[in-house]
Image (cartoon, coloured by chain):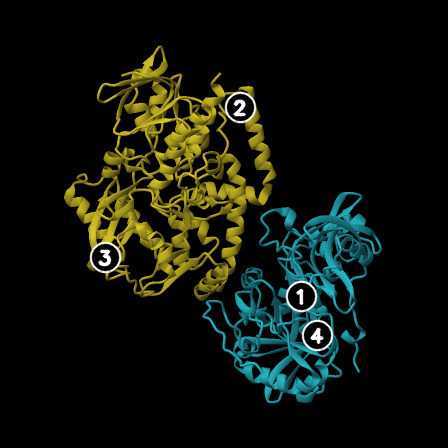
Chain colours: A yellow, B cyan
């Protein structure tokens, strides 16, 4: 079979779907090819155990761009973001720290631990808002190539220079600090209550093979701070039905706009003729032809697996090889017979309606990282949990619950490699860590799904299990993501484009890379 | 007589030590937040009574939600002098000074009062938390800073009868207590500090005591005040009084430099009508350099009271067959002000002044258009449609009775 399309998107993750929808919206014929039987990539909901639905990988939404929501009419197609109300950090002494959605409640709570921090918290929020506003235009801009002195690139650079100048000295200094410092050092400048610092710093290590004391972790923190919902900065939301429903809303929009989507259609090769992409071949031998091919996969798969190396310049291949994509996290999904009962706040309460963070101190997090540095999973891991069924009871049978645990660290290169025994040992470590704060957890687990970095790679196509398609470290951001001179969604192969999280501005369920890639492609389409 | 019904709900907001009394009295069940506390907006179903109590008898207000800091030690005055714009070395024992304070850019962070309680001992009141700001600016100083916000209860007794009420129970006659001065006395047997201060621009006092004395103090003042027409008053009443008095409110009339996301939201003291409180001749203080420059250049904005003229406003309503509809409570919505179709400012709070019989507002105006008597156009919505109606810059404060400052 061979139908010609204007564009073929490899990978039905949320970014691929966004790119497809935008191209279809512009009147192009588009085909999305997804290897698995479900759409969404890492933003996927699956009924892993009968009656229990999980956001199997990615579990919260905040970075989804509002113009994508509008352009693709996602609310009409099923986007329903419920607010996550709090961040609860249980502490070893049976005390706790909670940051609520409500300012007064948060202030009271912080004041209990440190009057100074309660005051600083507002000012930190002010700065993060200002920096967020300062960085947003950069995130929304196609990275100019400083090495190519074309008129257009220069114009973009001048624009960027002007933007930085407009920040003023104070904010520019703060931005420079955020770009270079460790989350721990930065937060030490602001706060004194360790669990507060540790919990904020945790967003600086998520998805990254770094500890809170590693330089560069402050930027990852900022990346997480930048999420907004309906224009409100730092809002995190939970999608009704799980994050897969975000992907499905995009897919429904794409289908309505005329795109074709095929699942269980693994692509084996990009077909290239005279240095130009002409289509793709599936593993079953089927071929599809198109004017352009867009890969939503990570840079390693996009360039080192789908393409014959000889089609690419050697220095480019080298930079993609050097692109850091070390997996650092695992995911444990629990089907529960009841709610976890935390010693710090027993019983049901609003503290279960938000994020629950096992991050009592820097040392706790840094020790967890130490384990991973030397090839072990953390014996006492950092865990970011949510209880989706509390917000959306349809995720589990009545009275039962699902719990999503994002876990760090789980190194891809585990000593001796991952196997079933190691996977279970890792799962046990996670449950033990939770049990220190919610002792009933062991008695209420009905089913347990443990995903190691190897599982994330094998099942979801995340190379080395990296959730961001490559670390958000300074040397691979902006015009260096994924490689110098190729940060504008183009590739050395004509007609071959990239639109995954491995491109600027990077990971999170933002849809930004898919949208910007589509915009660039359409610009060239005449 | 209707049967009285108990109305109560749980709250995670903080309750002031007077809550047991204020909750019982709050017929209107209109509450609002004030610095994380539950505060009564109105007690009476018709809150006008509360406003008139402040102006004609005495209104009793729970002002405990104010932030209160005790600053003591040899460097207490130097620390305050470093922070606030007024000259604290001139603040005599038992004197109180109202003052703003700024960041290095000379933009206002907050405003409040400095009370010189004892030798080397001051209380600072503020609208926002300032513990950290005080602490981080005190390094190397011989000073102790304590947050008394929770432990100090505060009432404001405001209105022409307030002195008579307090004199009946005070161990020391307050006739000689001058405007913006304080004294330590006992009310009955309760040790308190009484300062002749307030947020109403009227004769009035604020009374400061330990938290545990709160209910006894409330009961004593209410009981004593009964024949003098004492009335518990809420924020609605206070808001009208403070607009008449031309007193600014943080987050309404200005944004703290510590909260503003963009520079344009920040204001200097000069732009808020507080130039009189900036003492550039005193020693170095935070923001001085920027304020010197601003004084030289002249501020871009002024903060004034305007009067929305009655006859044209009445006419707008009459044209559609309605009597003029006036705001029954103070509003806090930014409202554009024009001169020759160009916007030259905006009003941030406004109200009908029941006493002056004037529709007034507090407004930020470009300096050029801020002189008393300047004719402006104020945007009003009349029965869903926008109109521009004449307004005039008037003297601030709009209401300034002699009794505010005078002693008998």
Q: Tag on residue A153?
A: 2
Q: Which residue is mark 4?
A: B54
The answer for how far apart the CA atoms under marks 4 and 2 are is 67 Å
Q: Tag on residue A337?
A: 3
The answer for how far apart the CA atoms under marks 4 and 3 are is 60 Å
Judge from the rendering whether residue A466 lies leftward or rightward of residue B171; answer left or right.
left
The verdict on a common chain for dots 4 and 2 is no
Can residue A384 be seen in the rendering of this structure? Answer: no
Q: Nearer the viewer, residue A157 or B20?
A: B20
- Eyeballing the image, is A254 above or below A98? above
Q: Which comes before the other along the chain, label 3 or label 2? A: 2
Q: Are marks 1 and 4 in contact (CB under 8 Å)?
A: no
- Eyeballing the image, is A477 above or below B178? above
Q: How many neighbours does mark 1 have within 10 angstroms: few (below 14), some (14-19), or many (20 or more)?
A: many
Q: Tag on residue B239?
A: 1
Q: How many neighbours does mark 4 have within 10 angstroms: few (below 14), some (14-19), or many (20 or more)?
A: many
Q: How many neighbours does mark 3 have within 10 angstroms: few (below 14), some (14-19), or many (20 or more)?
A: some
The answer for how far apart the CA atoms under marks 1 and 3 are is 54 Å
């Amino acid at each position: 079979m061979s139908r010609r399309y204007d564009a073929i998107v490899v990978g039905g993750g949320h970014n691929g779907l966004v790119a497809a929808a935008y191209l279809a919206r512009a009147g192009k014929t588009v085909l999305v090819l997804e290897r698995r039987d479900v759409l969404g990539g890492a933003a996927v909901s699956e009924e892993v155990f009968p009656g229990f639905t999980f956001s199997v990988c990615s579990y919260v939404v905040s970075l989804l761009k509002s113009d994508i929501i509008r352009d693709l009419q996602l609310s009409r197609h099923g986007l329903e973001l419920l607010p996550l109300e709090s961040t609860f950090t249980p502490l070893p002494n049976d005390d706790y720290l909670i940051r609520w959605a409500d300012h007064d409640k948060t202030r009271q709570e912080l004041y209990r631990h440190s009057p100074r921090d309660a005051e600083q918290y507002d000012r930190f929020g002010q700065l993060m808002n200002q920096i967020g506003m300062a960085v947003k235009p950069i995130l929304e801009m196609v990275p100019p190539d400083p090495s190519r002195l074309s008129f257009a690139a220069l114009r973009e650079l001048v624009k960027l220079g002007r933007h930085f100048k407009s920040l003023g000295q104070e904010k520019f200094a703060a931005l420079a600090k955020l770009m270079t410092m460790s989350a721990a050092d930065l937060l030490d400048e602001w706060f004194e209550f360790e669990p507060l610092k540790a919990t904020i710093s945790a967003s600086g290590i998520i998805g990254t093979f770094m500890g809170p004391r590693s330089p560069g972790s402050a930027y990852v923190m900022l990346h997480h701070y930048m999420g907004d919902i309906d224009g409100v900065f730092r809002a995190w939301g939970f999608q009704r039905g799980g994050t897969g429903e975000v992907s499905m809303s995009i897919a429904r929009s794409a289908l309505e706009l005329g795109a074709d989507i095929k699942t269980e259609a693994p692509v084996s090769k990009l077909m290239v003729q005279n240095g130009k992409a002409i289509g793709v071949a599936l593993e079953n031998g089927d071929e599809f032809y198109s004017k352009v091919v867009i890969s939503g996969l990570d840079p390693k798969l996009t360039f080192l697996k789908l393409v014959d190396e000889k089609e690419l310049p050697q220095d480019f291949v080298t930079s993609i090889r050097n692109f850091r994509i070390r997996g650092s996290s695992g995911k444990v999904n629990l089907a529960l017979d009841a709610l976890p009962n935390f010693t710090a706040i027993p019983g049901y309460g609003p503290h279960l309606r938000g994020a629950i963070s096992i991050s009592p101190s820097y040392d706790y997090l840094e020790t967890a990282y130490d384990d991973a540095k030397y090839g072990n999973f953390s014996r006492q891991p950092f865990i970011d949990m949510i209880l989706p069924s509390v917000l959306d009871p349809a995720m589990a049978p009545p009275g039962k619950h699902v719990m999503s645990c994002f876990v760090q660290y789980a190194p891809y290169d585990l000593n001796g490699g991952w196997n079933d025994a190691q996977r279970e040992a890792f799962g046990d470590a996670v449950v033990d860590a939770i049990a220190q704060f919610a002792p009933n957890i062991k008695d209420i687990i009905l089913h347990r799904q443990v995903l190691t970095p190897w599982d994330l790679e094998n099942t979801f196509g995340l190379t080395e299990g990296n959730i961001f398609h490559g670390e958000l470290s300074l040397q691979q951001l902006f015009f260096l993501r994924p490689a110098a001179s190729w940060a504008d969604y183009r590739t050395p192969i004509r007609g071959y484009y990239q639109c995954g999280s491995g491109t600027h501005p990077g990971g999170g369920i933002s849809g930004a890379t898919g949208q910007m890639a589509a915009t660039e492609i359409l610009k060239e389409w005449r | 007589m209707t049967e009285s019904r108990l109305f109560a709900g749980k709250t995670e907001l903080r309750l002031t030590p007077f809550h047991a009394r204020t909750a019982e009295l709050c017929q209107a069940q209109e509450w609002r937040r004030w610095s994380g506390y539950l505060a009564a907006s109105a007690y009476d179903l018709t809150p006008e009574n509360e406003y008139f109590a402040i102006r004609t008898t005495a209104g009793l207000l729970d002002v405990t939600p104010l932030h209160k800091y005790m600053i003591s030690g040899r460097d207490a005055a130097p620390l305050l002098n470093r922070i606030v714009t007024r000259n604290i070395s001139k603040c005599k024992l038992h004197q109180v000074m109202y003052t703003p304070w700024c960041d290095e850019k000379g933009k206002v962070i907050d405003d409040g009062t400095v009370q010189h309680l004892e030798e080397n001992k001051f209380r600072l009141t503020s609208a926002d938390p300032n513990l950290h700001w005080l602490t981080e600016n005190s390094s190397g100083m011989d000073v102790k800073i304590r947050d008394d916000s929770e432990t100090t209860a505060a009432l404001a007794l405001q209105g022409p009868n307030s002195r008579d009420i307090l004199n009946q129970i005070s161990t020391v006659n307050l006739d000689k207590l001058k405007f913006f001065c304080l004294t330590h006395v006992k009310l009955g047997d309760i040790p308190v500090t009484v300062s002749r201060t307030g947020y109403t621009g009227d004769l009035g006092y604020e009374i400061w005591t330990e938290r545990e004395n709160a209910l006894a103090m409330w009961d004593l003042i209410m009981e004593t005040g009964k024949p003098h027409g004492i009335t518990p008053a809420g924020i609605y009443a206070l808001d009208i009084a403070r607009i008449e008095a031309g007193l600014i409110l943080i987050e309404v009339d200005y944004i703290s430099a510590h909260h503003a996301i963009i520079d344009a939201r920040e204001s200097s003291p000069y732009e808020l009508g507080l130039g009189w409180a900036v003492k550039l001749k005193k020693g170095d203080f935070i923001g001085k350099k920027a304020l010197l420059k601003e004084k030289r250049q002249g501020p871009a904005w002024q903060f004034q009271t305007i009067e929305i003229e009655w006859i044209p406003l009445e006419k707008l309503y009459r044209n559609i067959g309605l009597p003029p509809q006036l705001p029954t409570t103070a509003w806090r919505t930014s409202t554009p002000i024009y001169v020759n179709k160009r916007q030259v400012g905006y009003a941030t709070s406004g109200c009908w002044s029941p006493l002056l019989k004037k529709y007034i507002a507090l407004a930020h105006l470009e300096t050029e258009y801020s002189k008393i008597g300047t004719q402006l156009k104020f945007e009003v919505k009349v029965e869903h449609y926008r109109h521009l109606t004449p307004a005039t810059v008037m003297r601030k404060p709009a209401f300034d009775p002699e009794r505010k400052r005078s002693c008998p």
